[in-house]
Image: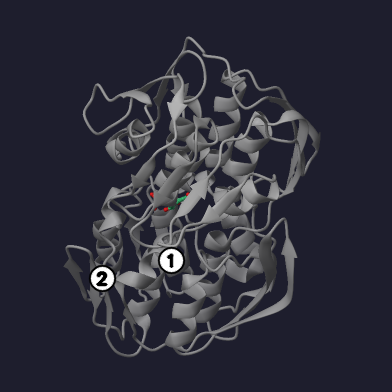
Amino acid sequence: MTPLLGLVRVPGDKSIGHRACMLAALGDGRSTVRGLSGGGDNRSTRSALVALGVTQTRLDPETIGFEGVGLRGLRASDAPLDCGNSGTTLRLLMGILSGQTGRFVLTGDASLRRRPMKRVADCLRRLGADIALPEGDHAPVVVTGGSLTGATVEGAVASAQVKSAVLLAGLMGVGPTRYREPEDTRDHTERMLRALGVPLDRTSDGGWVVTPVVALPPRDWQVPGDPSSAAFFCAAAALVPGSEIRLPGVCLNPGRTGFLRVLARMGASVSVEDRETRDGEPVGTLVARSGPLRGVTIAPAEVPACIDELPLLALLAATAEGETRITGAAELRVKECDRIEAVARLLRDDGAEVEVLPDGWHLAGGHRPRGGFTAACHDDHRIALCAAILGRAAPRPIALDSPGAIDVSYPDFLLTLARLGGAAGDPRP
Ligand code: S3P
């Protein structure tokens, strides 16, 4: 196996990218967003905002200019807003549109239309939002904008999307809105609102309280590299002997770097250099090298900070020395696909021993990747990326049944993997 060697600039962080576009749209005047990912999910947010009346201009290959319409200035569109594959687009817009004027229908692709929306609607209704779910728990979602009151809201699930929808709606409430989540989740919305000068504080019970504002200022946002994308190269480097990959400018928000803490426990060699703070977010260079891995236990409390990387950690754990148990991750069943079943299928198709738990996996460890099959990716970018990494570590190639799914978060991934010496096989069926 040829080692993976070189430097990779991963796309802009998807979570921060969505929020930067939305906050730029709601600002008074021109904002810019630099380093935005060109992936399908961030494109979904941009096109929904165009449909809501927000003019955008590409200023250079890296930068989009947004003509902000003001906090309550989004315009209702006749056609449903297509959020594509992006849960963050749909759920955060539910919060923002609750305080606008007009009626908005939000929908998405087949995967997004299977994902739960009542968790967001229930919380926003506490602020007086008018939200209808004609299909039950799923999109399409009908939001009729109106005046919102401040409220105290308890989230039933640990979800940064639900929290963000409430805090963004809270900007337009009458009186403060408090939100408490069952576990801490990524705090990009909080950091970004504070960067805009919004009064947002922690409550004594570990929640957040946001005070409404009359307007949001424009700002030049710099989106750091996506740690969830960087994680795939850290995994590839760990698996392929002799590899060393440098990943500069990666967001190191502790709410996102749970995978680094787990990798350290597994004995992987990933170090951090050039630490700095950009736009309130810690950023640094990851240097990932190959090395043996050992099995670990990932406890429920650790899950929110590595929720999107758990499929990849399960893959690594399958190859590690010793057993791994991952629990408390039932949320994976309602992501872009049922990621617990999808990962088990991928690993079993490769010959690994995996026990599926209701909320995670038990992995026997000791698996040597084999390859030589077509992976079922379920049109889910993270499963397709896992299959590509597994294939790169195997002596025979793994074809992907839906390589196009990767476009959602990392359009150039397969090319980049090949450039690092990764052309081990044709990833298409
Ligand atoms: C995200 C939050 C997480 C994560 C998703 C992006 C966000 O979802 O899985 O990829 O940007 O807030 P949940 O909030 O549903 O856990």
Q: Name the residue that disc number 1 marks.
A: 306
Is ligand 1 within 8 Å of the beta carbon of the residue shown at mark 1? Answer: no
Q: Position of residue 397 (x, y in %)?
A: 43, 65
**As drawn, 314 above or below 100:** below
Q: State the CA–CA distance, disc 2 to disc 1.
A: 12 Å
Q: Residues within 10 Å of mark 2 (few under 14, many from 20)?
A: some
Residue occupying the point 52% across, 21% down: 100
Looking at the rendered structure, the secondary structure element under dot 2 is: loop
Image marks 2 and 1: residues in contact by CB distance under 8 Å: no
The residue lying toward the viewer, choosing from 138 and 102, is 102
The residue lying toward the viewer, choosing from 197 and 394, is 197
Q: Is residue 274 left or right of residue 79?
A: right
N-terminal of the two: label 2 or label 1? 1
Residue furthest out toward the top: 78
Q: Is residue 275 left or right of residue 181?
A: right
Q: Position of residue 28 (x, y in %)?
A: 73, 28
Q: Is residue 410 visible?
A: no
Residue occupying the point 41% across, 48% down: 179
**As drawn, 372 above or below 381:** below
Q: Quadrant of residue 266?
A: bottom left
Q: Position of residue 357 (x, y in %)?
A: 17, 67
| Coloration mode | one colour
Q: Quadrant of residue 278?
A: bottom right
The label number, if any, that marks residue 327 in the structure image = 2
Q: Is residue 9 left or right of residue 414?
A: right
Residue occupying the point 42% across, 69% down: 390
Looking at the rendered structure, the secondary structure element under dot 1 is: helix
Residue occupying the point 24% across, 58% down: 341
Amino acid type at image mark 2? Thr
The label number, if any, that marks residue 150 in the structure image = none
Q: Is residue 295 visible?
A: yes
